[in-house]
Image (cartoon, rainbow, N blue to C red):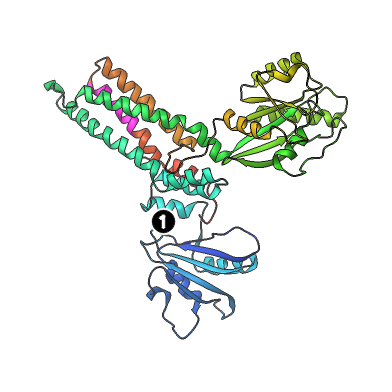
Amino acid sequence: MLNDTIIALATPQGVGAIAVIRLSGQDAITVTDRFFQKAGKSKMPLTAQKTHTVHFGNIVAADGEIIDEVVATLFVAPHSFTKENVVEISCHGSPFIVERIIRLFLEAGVRLAKPGEFTQRAFLNGRFDLAQAEAVADLIAADTESARRSALHQMRGGFSNEIKKLREELINFASLIELELDFGEEDVEFADRKQLTDLVQKIIAFLERLMQSFSLGNVLKNGVPTVIAGKPNAGKSTLLNALLNEEKAIVSEIPGTTRDFIEDTLVIEGINFRFIDTAGLRQTDDRIEAIGVARTREKMAQAALIIYLFDLLETSVSEVEEAEKELQQLGKPYLLVGNKVDRTVPDLAHHPHIIRISAAERIGLDELKAALLEAVNARPVAVGETVVTNLRHYEALSNARRALTDVLHGLQSHVTADFVAMDIRHALRALGEITGEITTEDLLGNIFSKFCIGK
């Protein structure tokens, strides 16, 4: 498989000004030479050209038909993304042209790349470790500044370097413990138990800080699905329009206007919130509206955050308390938001847990946005800050902490060296799984299958 030369479209599908077709493999440059005719007087083949050079010419079929004028960029191994010979062909962005060019190479024995295969080859060829490879996909998918910054820091090895340092320190002690096992009958200790205890405690504290960052990392990577719920005519659609600063949802005084949910996104302080306007919560004999109410409850159960909006003029304290009990049963963050504060407000004017706004007059929206960020513990990511954004990494960190906690208990209980060594090996394995020093074929297949084709 790794000896094959692969090809894929590296730019999005569809019509565009240009498209980029990428090849990688030992024969990538040689096979491109078969179809590439360089423009101008020089007829020097691509195989004789230097790395990181750009060449203008034509892609020509075997029968002499010119398919397109292209630019071919060469990356000679090991000076490429995959550390193999790589050619990037920039052609006109017609899907028909792209298909013709790719078909030419497939007929010449090149294989169509699998999802993520270029990045997988880069990892297998030592271009970067597994955590950095995963960051490539995160960087491509980043849709906020904080997500971009976090992915770029990880891709450049910030997270990996921290894990490797911890692992190296632990390996030094593990080797001494293993040495003790070789001299089991001598009853000697090569590893200072006090120093090992201090190191394990330091590593556990560091792992816990990384794990605590996952709540923020998950928000950065996946955004915050936020449901706007409440009774009919509370102003949910008006609030959505006010937050988005556009007329996204239909606003009407007739109860039950919103029967299906409406979604749109808004970036607040670098965090992507996906707001979902839903049907009003009430008992109804209208079958269509009842379906909308049922979907609202489904969305509330799936949401990461709920804005429960109500009319300050029409809602009593007891009604708010009843709604809050229902929200608490869902077990997720929520905000109680009272609307129409611009009008005369009775009992709920000074309720401490209520954010008071006027969606129509856009009053209190800044306070609401601040509360949204606080509810999900979200904040912008500092330059160079390590934030765990990957569930696989979080689980590996958790396994490492669990194993190191066992090491700590074993040291405190004065267990024999073989048990200490076993727990240290478990911790090292968990940390090694993050960077790819310890992998399985199934793990790699699962990770890279989620990448787009051509990356």
Give the left or right position of residue 56, taking residue 229 as reference: left
Magenta stretch encompasses residue 163: no
Residue extending farthest to the left is: 186
Is 61 in front, or is 143? Answer: 143
Is 107 in front, or is 226? Answer: 226
Above or below — where is 108 with respect to 4? below
Give the left or right position of residue 360, taking residue 427 as reference: right
Magenta stretch encompasses residue 425: yes
Residue lying at 73% horizontally and 20% vertically, measured from the top left? 349
- Which image quadrant for residue 196? top left
Q: Which residue is mark 1?
A: 2
Highlighted magenta segment, given as a residue range: 417-428
Is 226 in front, or is 187? Answer: 226
Residue 69 in the image: state x and y as whole percent.
57, 75
Magenta segment, prevailing SS (helix, strand or loop): helix
Residue 338 in the image: state x and y as whole percent.
73, 25
* Total residue callouts: 1
Residue 7 in the image: state x and y as whole percent.
51, 61
Work out which quarter of the rendered image holds the N terminus and state it: bottom left
Q: Amino acid at mark 1?
A: Leu
